[in-house]
Image (spheres, rainbow, N blue to C red):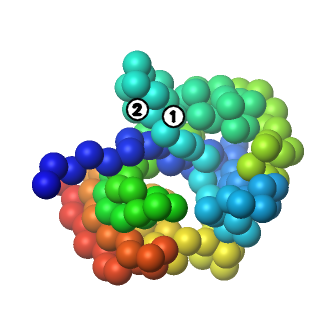
Amino acid sequence: MPYTPIVATLGYVLSPDHSQVLMIHRNARPGDHHLGKYNGLGGKVERDEDVVSGMRREIMEEAGISCESMRMRGTISWPGFGKHGEDWLGFVFVIDRFSGTPLERNPEGTLEWVAVDRLLELPLWEGDRHFLPLVFDADPRSFHGVMPYQDGRMQSWSWSRL
């Protein structure tokens, strides 16, 4: 069976001193699949854009800021992750520099600056606890992982680097 995932971006915007990251607390829509959880920013890549353009667009839409410098940290395949069991493929970025002032909230929830070293204390998707250390580590190589989900629960996690 061919793998036909929903292609998405996931971005982590760093504060100017790189000690904090801008997260969205998904607390605005009662029917939200992510309700109550903290997430990076991002979303589906549109048909006519590349993943970098998609990341820039999502950061502008969700936070009201422009990406000035960013790095792709890795990719994650999430088979079965969607609300109805859809497969997702995410391109994970760190935004090192931005211009503008971030919004305080958007239609999905409240935007909050969180200390990078406290991220794992937040209510996150179970799987985020496995890949977030790779997003913020000092290794310059990209990571590439697979994290299958079934019935809303992570089943396993494996990854490699080039």
Residue that carries the numbered disc 2 in the rendered image: 51
Q: Residue at x 32, y 70 (%)?
A: 148
Q: In which quarter of the view is residue 116 placed?
A: bottom right
Pick whichever, 94 or 31, lies toward us.
31
Q: Count the marks.
A: 2
Please give left or right for residue 26 compared with residue 78 in the image: right
Pick whichever, 152 or 23, lies toward us.
152
Cβ atoms under marks 2 and 1 closer than 8 Å: yes
Helix, strand or loop at label 1? It is helix
Q: Residue 125, image x and y in percent?
A: 55, 71
* Most distant residue in the right direction: 104
Depicted 86 relative to depicted 98: above or below: below
Q: CA distance from mark 2 to mark 1?
A: 6 Å
Q: Residue 21, image x and y in percent?
A: 66, 54
Depicted 22 relative to depicted 85: above or below: above
Q: Residue at x 55, y 29 (%)?
A: 56
Q: In which quarter of the view is residue 143 placed?
A: bottom left
Q: Residue at x 38, y 42 (%)?
A: 7
Q: Residues within 10 Å of mark 2 (few under 14, many from 20)?
A: many
Residue that carries the numbered disc 1 in the rendered image: 55
* Residue 94 visible to an observer of this rendering: no
Depicted 48 relative to depicted 76: above or below: above
* Residue 119 visible to an observer of this rendering: yes
Amino acid tagged 2: Val
Amino acid tagged 1: Met
Pick whichever, 6 or 84, lies toward us.
84
Please give left or right for residue 53 compared with residue 63 in the image: left
